Image (tube, rainbow, N blue to C red):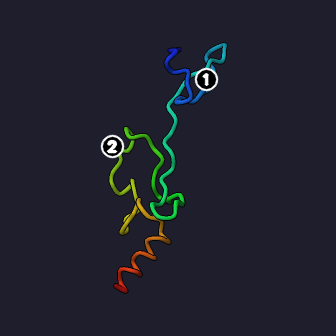
Amino acid sequence: MALKHRNRSFRKVSVKLSTRVTVHYRKRNPARAQCGKCGKFLQGVPRAKPVALRTMPKTKKRPQRPYGGVLCSACTRKVMIIKARA
């Protein structure tokens, strides 16, 4: 166990080895994606590390609609109505 991993950036995970239980340190998952306008958590956006996102196809990373992965559905609806009226 490296001393550099004993901090709050890593989370503690108890792992049972053959006869004893030890503590392993794993990287934390990133925070959930939030709407840029209202701050609500976004649906359909994965909570994964950048390494996993690189191999993931683009269609799995965000919803397929205008402002998908940036605004929630309610805020997108409001923006589209405002744009249509202008």
Q: Residue at x 37, y 86 (%)?
A: 85
Q: Quadrant of residue 50?
A: top left
Quarter containing the C terminus: bottom left
Badge number at residue 4: none
Q: Residue at x 61, y 20 (%)?
A: 23
Q: Nearer the viewer, mark 1 or mark 2?
A: 2
Residue 79 appears left or right of 18: left
Q: What residue did someone put label 2 on? A: 54
User: Among all residues in the image, which is located at the extreme bottom?
Assistant: 85
Q: Secondary structure at mark 1?
A: strand
Q: Quadrant of residue 52?
A: top left
| Mark 1 surroundings within 10 Å by alpha-carbon count, few (fewer than 14), some (14 through 19), many (20 or more) | few
Q: What is the number of callouts on the image?
A: 2
Q: Residue at x 51, y 50 (%)?
A: 32
Q: CA distance from mark 1 to mark 2?
A: 28 Å
Q: Secondary structure at mark 2?
A: helix
- Say which of 55 and 45 sits in front: 45
- Say which of 81 and 24 sits in front: 81
Question: Along the polypeptide, which appears first: circle 1 or circle 2?
Answer: 1
| Mark 2 surroundings within 10 Å by alpha-carbon count, few (fewer than 14), some (14 through 19), many (20 or more) | few
Q: As shown in the figure, which amino acid type bears the numbered disc 1?
A: Val
**Is 26 located above or below residue 84 in the figure?**
above
Residue 44 position within the rendered picture, expressed as x and y whole percent measured from the top left:
47, 58
Q: What residue did someone put label 1 on? A: 15
